[in-house]
Image: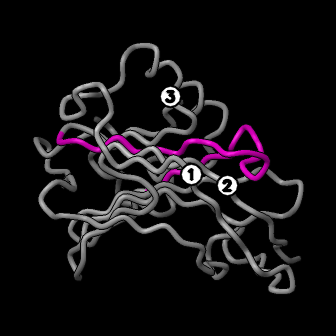
């Protein structure tokens, strides 16, 4: 099996973060919003991860409920001292709360840079590395418009999910989440990370 290429289009709306935000060095912080390859006709998968002090392993993955190559869509990250919220077309798909009070590190002390690129991760990203990139379909392109890295109209430093957004988040996680590190007993046989039970 091979992955065939296509164009990928997206709006960027960044409220202190989107794409891949990363600091530098061995103990870097990073917020990932990645799109994994797929077979033609299969759902597209969004992969999210949060690194703090060089340690990730906080992955969640979702199938999108639409074809992201058909039109522009808004993929955004709200990142403030209380929370990180990943959203697709203003629908939250994941929230990573600041739980430093129970010993969970939170990325807030290092400046980060924004990266957006297409890169080959077929050793792990597409069905665990089973499907390889079909390089005959190159070039692979991504288009961006309406890039915004400014705080939105709400006071973003204290912004979080309102009750309607919390319901949307539950809907996405119930219907479209395909992987959650907080339920992977094979990765964490000694017990899940503390944020999983908070």
Camera-nearest residue between 4 and 103:
4
Position of the C terminus by quadrant: top left
Secondary structure at numbered mark 1: strand
**Residues tagged 1 and 2 counted as in contact (Cβ below 8 A):** yes
> Please, what secondary structure does the residue beneath circle 3 have?
helix
Q: CA distance from mark 1 to mark 2?
A: 8 Å
Where is residue 145? Give x, y as percent.
Answer: 56, 51
Q: Residues within 10 Å of mark 1 (few under 14, many from 20)?
A: few
Q: Name which of mark 1 and mark 3 comes first in the sequence.
A: 1
Q: What residue sits 57% from the left and 35% below the top?
A: 89
Q: Which mark is residue 9?
A: 2
Residue 169 is labelled as 3
For discs 1 and 3, the disc positioned in front in the rendered view: 1
Q: Which residues are magenta?
A: 59-81
- Furthest-top residue in this view: 163
Q: Secondary structure at mark 2?
A: strand
Q: Which numbered circle lies on residue 145? A: 1
């Amino acid at each position: 099996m091979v992955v065939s290429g296509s164009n990928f289009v997206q709006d960027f709306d960044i409220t202190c973060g989107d794409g891949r935000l990363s600091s530098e060095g061995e103990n870097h912080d990073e917020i990932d919003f990645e799109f994994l390859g797929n077979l033609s006709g299969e759902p597209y998968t969004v992969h999210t991860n949060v690194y703090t002090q060089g340690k990730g392993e906080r992955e969640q993955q979702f199938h999108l409920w639409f074809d992201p190559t058909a039109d522009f869509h808004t993929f955004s990250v709200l990142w403030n001292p209380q929370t990180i919220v990943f959203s697709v077309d203003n629908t939250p798909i994941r929230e990573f709360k600041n739980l430093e009070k129970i010993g969970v590190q939170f990325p807030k002390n290092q400046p980060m840079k924004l990266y957006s690129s297409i890169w080959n991760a077929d050793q792990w990203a597409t069905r665990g590395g089973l499907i390889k990139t079909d390089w005959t379909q190159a070039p692979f392109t991504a288009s961006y418009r309406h890039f915004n890295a400014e705080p939105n109209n709400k006071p973003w430093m204290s912004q979080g999910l309102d009750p309607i957004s919390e319901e949307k988040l539950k809907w996405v996680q119930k219907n479209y989440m395909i992987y959650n590190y907080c339920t992977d007993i094979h990765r964490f046989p000694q017990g899940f990370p503390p944020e999983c039970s908070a």
